Image: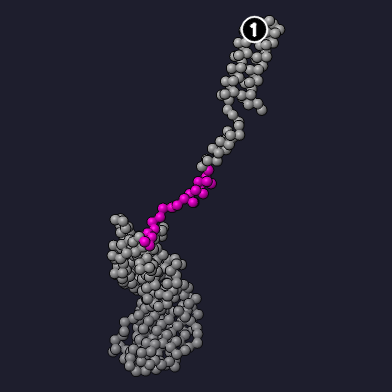
Amino acid sequence: MLSLASLALVVALVLAASAYAVVRFDALDRRVALVVVAAALVTGGVAAQVAPSDSPADVERTVSAASDEATPERLAAEQAEAPTASHEVSNGTNATVVGVGDGGRVTYRMDGETRTVRLAGVDVPSAGGADPALFDGVVTGSRGRACLAREGRRALLDTRAQLVDESVSVRTGEDGAVLVADGRSVNRRLVERGNARATTRTYADAERSARSAHIGVWSCSVVEPSRPLREANASNVRIDAIHPNPPGDDAASLNDEYVVIENAGSRTVDLSDWYLIVGDDEMHFFFDGQTLRPGEEIVLRMGSGRNTEGTVYWGASSPVLDNDHETLKLVDGDTDRTVRVSY
């Protein structure tokens, strides 16, 4: 198709030719014809100047302008590549801890500004206690909550003593902050010492070690009764510890459900006539042929296995100990003396 400029030029030429023909054949005044031709040429020239150009340069500019438009795909790519706001304090920049709050909150000062953060990847029980269900393996109920409250207070005091007025590096994210003091992660140290449970895989190995050692919050998975009065238990055989709630599925961890019997006396005791009664169902276990020398312990595991010196097995096919509200009675069959423990 002809452009507007080309069309205007053609019209001008047609008008000029027409004027010439009129003069030639109709004998009109030549001056009139010249005026018509001049007017036609001027009209064509003006139209040519005004008309837009389709030159390659113009096309290139049009394509370039279109490519600069902010399409959704381009905006998404630019946002993905754009740097995000960061609150990281590098190892070369120190923040000073000014306070440690309940439940794993830490307040620090940097560049004249004070910030409070929650430690990431860990769950520190508060001084008022915590839900035992969150700490898998801890004894449930009021005894578990009271134990977690005690460990929460201990963690609070220990962390304050270690961190307040100390220089730390801080790295924060959406789930909290990681503090580094003396080149070691404060978060990991809390889990290693049993002051907190891990909420991410980062500290899962530290939690496993603390669980195995029954330290800190994981000591709450073991019931440790007070020593019985001598007159109520002349032989000084006692229930030393109870582990009723193994981590995970109790039915799959029967041998991690156990009771520890200790001879706290000064003479060897024959346990052949002793038995353990568990709960209202009065399930019985007899310690046939077992003896305990002074200071020795015997562990009764609820699952199955081969009895060895220091370990015997109940042989149960399902959990025996309730995770809460249970009563155990250790009975001397010869004298009917009973050691009773409830949790």
| Residue matched to label 1 | 30
Nearer-the-camera pick, 153 or 96: 96
Q: Which amino acid does label 1 sit on?
A: Arg
Stretch of the chain drawn in magenta: 71-92
Return the x and y of residue 27 as percentages of the image width and height. Answer: 68, 5
Residue drawn at (40%, 78%) of the image: 213
In this view, 208 is above or below 57 = below
Residue 254 image position (x, y, % from top left): 47, 79
Vertical placement of 251 versus 297: above or below? Answer: above
Place of residue 222 in the rendered image (x, y in percent of width and height, measured from the top left): 38, 78
At x 62%, y 21%, the residue is 8
From the viewer's perspective, is residue 221 above or below residue 86?
A: below
- The residue drawn where x is 60% and y is 14% is 39
Whether residue 90 is in magenta: the answer is: yes
Q: In this view, does 3 lie to the left or right of 286?
A: right
Query: In the rendered image, which quarter contains the C terminus?
Result: bottom left
Image quarter for residue 209?
Answer: bottom left
Residue sitting at 37 percent across and 87 percent down? Answer: 262
The image quarter in which residue 99 lies: bottom left
Q: Does residue 124 appear in this view? A: no
Secondary element at image label 1: helix
Relative to 175, residue 183 above or below: below
Q: Is-magenta flag for residue 34?
A: no
